[in-house]
């Protein structure tokens, strides 16, 4: 049996419900491949109270989430110690607290369970590796001590091997399954640019905003939608108000994932200026939803471009990005090109789920 251990769910970039949906899909595939009727255990601690929530919706997960606080920590610890006596693998909810609790417990109790960590988009470029900081040191050490490491792209795989000298035998490449609308309603798309993600320096939010404002100033029939929250939201709102274009700009904050998918499907262009992309979930969700994607050139987007050749355009300068956005707004993607990459998505999702399940057996 597998255990997902997440003592800091509030620090996860996904909503708890999105994370549960994802692990329910993983667990279903795990059961199918293992030919056993056993569920995956999911235990964690969150800042919200889930005591009245009906977790029976998740058919393949045994879910227990405790409320953040002293009693929650005690209950979580008791549940964890009880669980690890019968688990074959512990999937660490983060490579910091969750991993080291699982690793120390394994050594103290002389248990034989394996520990797997996932790296979705943590910066692993050369500069980050060379700079000493506690997070870098903890992550590097976790990678060396983990039994397996799941990464979501070849780019991260190469960085782990080349920069941190991690054995390739430890690494499993299994991208996150991508959810998209069943049908694309092209006639309902607005002449709208979408910026999606955390309002944080690591997402290049001010570069995206600079590009989008230039496009709006030159194209009066175009609007901008910003979905996401974060520490830079007040500065983003100030820049929008000072631009004089705020009547055509909407900032919605963080939305549940089903609502995000609806907003994606209504837009025409996704603009992404993240300096680094580990996987590019938003990029893929947008492309599979019939959007053109204009993204900053980096190792992650170069890899994604090979998967999404008709939908993804990469830029290196602001002027180049503005031109690409205007081109994407004027020209519609071919339906046949979009359907082709949507069909590829199904096989990619199935293969990813299969690899994850195999790594848990």
Image: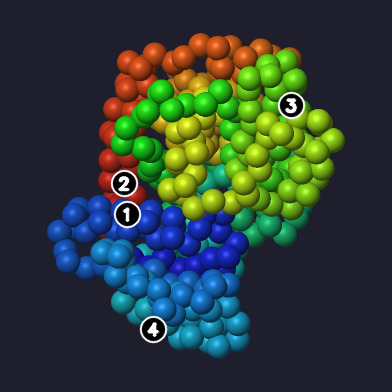
Q: Which residue is mark 1?
A: 26
Residue at point 51%, 77% (across, down)? 49
Q: How many marks?
A: 4
- In space, the residues marked 3 and 2 are separated at their CA atoms by 40 Å
Numbered circle sitting on residue 82: 4
- Could you tell me how far apart the alpha carbons at marks 2 and 4 are, in whole angstroms? 28 Å
Q: Is residue 165 above or below residue 77?
A: above
Q: Of the residues tagged 1 and 3, which is closer to the observer?
A: 3
Give me the C-alpha separation between circle 1 and circle 2. 6 Å
**Colour convention of the picture:** rainbow
Q: Earlier in the sequence, mark 3 or mark 2?
A: 3
Labels 4, 3: front one: 3
Q: Are marks 1 and 2 in contact (CB under 8 Å)?
A: yes
- The answer to whether the residues at label 4 and label 1 have Cβ atoms under 8 Å apart is no
Pointer 3 residue: 213
Decide which of 203, 171 is in the foreground and name it.
203
Name the front one of labels 4 and 1.
1
Q: Nearer the viewer, residue 183 or 63?
A: 183
Q: Position of residue 12 (x, y in %)?
A: 56, 59
User: Measured from the top left, where is residue 148 in percent x and y?
Assistant: 43, 54
Q: Earlier in the sequence, mark 1 or mark 3?
A: 1
Residue beneath the point at 28% across and 51% down: 358
Give the CA distance from mark 1 to mark 3: 40 Å
| Disc 2 packing (10 Å; few <14; some 14–19; many ≥20) | many
Residues at marks 4 and 3 touching, judged by CB atoms closer than 8 Å: no
Residue corresponding to mark 2: 353
Mark 4 secondary-structure assignment: helix
Q: Residue 290 location, x and y as percent?
A: 42, 26
Vertical placement of residue 182 versus 170, above or below: above
First reached walking from the N terminus: tag 4 or tag 3: 4
Q: Are marks 2 and 4 in contact (CB under 8 Å)?
A: no
């Amino acid at each position: 049996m597998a255990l997902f251990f997440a003592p800091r769910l509030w620090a996860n970039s996904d909503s708890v419900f999105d994370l549960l949906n994802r692990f329910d899909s993983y667990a279903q595939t795990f059961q199918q491949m293992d030919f056993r009727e056993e569920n995956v255990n999911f235990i964690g601690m969150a800042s919200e109270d889930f005591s009245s929530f009906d977790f029976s919706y998740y058919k393949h997960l045994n879910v227990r989430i405790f409320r953040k606080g002293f009693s929650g920590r005690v209950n979580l610890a008791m549940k964890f110690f009880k669980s690890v006596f019968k688990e074959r693998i512990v999937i660490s909810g983060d490579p910091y607290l969750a991993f080291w609790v699982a690793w120390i417990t394994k050594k103290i109790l002389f248990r034989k369970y394996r520990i797997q960590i996932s790296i979705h988009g943590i910066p692993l470029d050369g500069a980050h590796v060379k700079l000493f900081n506690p997070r870098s040191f903890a992550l590097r050490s976790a990678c060396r001590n983990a039994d397996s490491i799941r990464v979501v792209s070849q780019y991260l795989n190469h960085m782990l091997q080349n920069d941190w000298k991690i054995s390739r035998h430890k690494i499993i490449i299994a991208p996150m399954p991508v959810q998209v609308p069943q049908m694309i309603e092209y006639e309902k798309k607005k002449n709208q640019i979408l910026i999606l993600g955390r309002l944080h320096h690591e997402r290049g939010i001010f570069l995206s905003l600079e590009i989008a404002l230039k496009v709006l100033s030159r194209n009066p029939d175009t609007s901008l939608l910003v979905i996401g929250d974060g520490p830079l939201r007040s500065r983003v709102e100030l820049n929008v108000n000072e631009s004089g274009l705020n009547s055509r700009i909407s900032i919605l904050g963080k939305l549940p994932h089903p609502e995000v998918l609806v907003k994606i499907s209504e837009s025409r262009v996704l603009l992404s200026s993240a300096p680094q992309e580990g996987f590019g979930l938003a990029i893929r969700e947008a492309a599979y939803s019939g959007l053109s994607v204009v993204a900053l050139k980096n190792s992650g987007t170069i890899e994604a471009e090979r998967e999404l050749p008709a939908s993804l355009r990469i830029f290196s300068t602001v002027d180049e990005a503005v031109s690409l956005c205007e081109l994407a707004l004027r020209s519609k993607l071919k339906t046949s090109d979009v359907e082709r990459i949507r069909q590829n998505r199904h096989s990619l999702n199935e293969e990813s789920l299969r690899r994850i399940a195999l790594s848990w057996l």
